[in-house]
Every structure is written in C-alpha cells, then in structure tokens.
Image: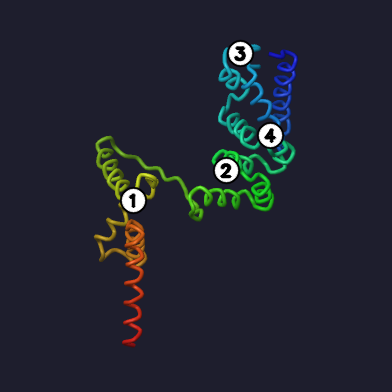
Amino acid sequence: MDKARAQQVLARIDEILRWEQRTDQQKDQKFAELGKHLCEVRDQGYWRLGHKSFEAYLEEKFPDSRRKAYYLMSIHDHLRQIPTAEIETLGWSKALELAKVARSEGRRFDSATWLHRAKECTKQELKEEVYKYFTGEDYEPYEMVYFKLFESQLPVVERALYVASRMVGTERSRGYCLELICADFLAGRTEESTPEEMLLVIHRLVHLLPPDYQTRLANHSEEAESKAARKC
C-alpha cells in the first residue's frame, strides 16, 4: 500500500464530507469525486489505516446511510469513461440512472448518447427513459400503499397473490397481481361495476393470452365491427 497516497485520499474524503455539512445548498456537488475516492479506498485497502474492514470505514463516514456510499461507488464503477466534471454537472440522480444502464450494457454502453440524453432531459424524463429501456413499457407513476393484515389473513392473501402470479408470470409485480385479483372480484359484481372497471378487466385478461390469440381476438373484433357497419 502507498501510505502517502492512502492518507491523501482519506483526508480528501473527510474534507468533502465536512464541506457538504457546511454547504447544504450545494450538497452533493462533489459526489463523483467522492465516489471515485471511495472506490480507491475499497480497491487499494486504504481502510486498513485505522479500521478493521471497509464496512467499518463506511459506517463511520456515513452514519446515517451507507446506501449513499454504495450509490456513489456504483456511479464511478460504471461511468468511468465519462469525466468526473461532466458527471457532476448532471447531478447524482441522473448519474445513478445512467449507471444502471451502463451496468446492464457493459462494454456496449454508448456513453456519449446517454450523456447527451441526460443533459437534455429533466430528472423525471430520464428516469422514464431508463424505465422504458429496461421494461419496454412507458413509465407509469406509482405510489406506495400500506395497510395492516392479521397473521390469520396472510395465508389467504399470499395464496391469492401466488395463484395470480402463476397466471400472469412471475416477472409481474405483486401490485399488478393484486390489481388483477381486485378486477376479477369486480367482474363478478356486474351490478356494482362501472363500464370503465369492466373494460379494465377485459384489458387485463386479453394481455394474459398468448400473442397469437391476442391477434385472433383483434381480427375477430374487426370483423364484428365491419358486419355491424354493413348492417347500418
């Protein structure tokens, strides 16, 4: 270990953290440099100067949340081809989204194209683009919903979610499965369901069909519409 270099890097990390505490309005402007130094501490073992492990070092320097440190290191690990100064002009929220794509594409990552997108987009727009890149679907806003279940209720709920996941595919979220269960319940109460709710049920069920059956259903609908138009 180059102890002189180690002490220099460790001192610089402390300096940045102190600077962040003093300048709340400019906090995280040096996130890329901080992530770079943290990776060096991890890779070169500089944490040995005073700590038993790298985890112990992070716990001391990031007492509120070590997650931030891992985010910063992920940005540096996967965006090394982009200059630190350019990454910091984006802000760490955008940089983290780019890191997700870079981690997925590896050497195929087109840093210039994605960097241009990040500069042109807002944080939310970039998040939506990255979501579409991974899922192929348009981003849909969401919110977390919490409610209490008794232990006696859990087996029934878990079983229903399991059966629904078998129907729609295990890659679907539990929220999607819960929506399907609720839609199926409403479909059985036609006198209390609105046309919009019934249409949602039909839409979800159609998407459960294999692609060729979806095509056959669409063709059948077009034929029915043509016959109705001729009668009119």
Disc 2 is placed on an element classified as helix
The circle drawn on residue 101 is 2
| Left or right for 209, reference 46 | left
- The residue under label 3 is 51
Q: Give the quadrant of residue 102.
A: top right
The circle drawn on residue 168 is 1
Identified by mark 3, the residue type is His
Disc 1 is placed on an element classified as helix
Q: Nearer the viewer, mark 2 or mark 3?
A: 2
Image spot of residue 224 (x, y percent): 31, 77
Identified by mark 4, the residue type is Ala
**Please, which residue is most extreme toward the front here?**
107
Q: Residue at x 39, y 47 (%)?
A: 172
The circle drawn on residue 230 is none
Considering only order in the chain, which callout, 3 or 2, is on the residue closer to the N terminus? 3
Identified by mark 2, the residue type is Val
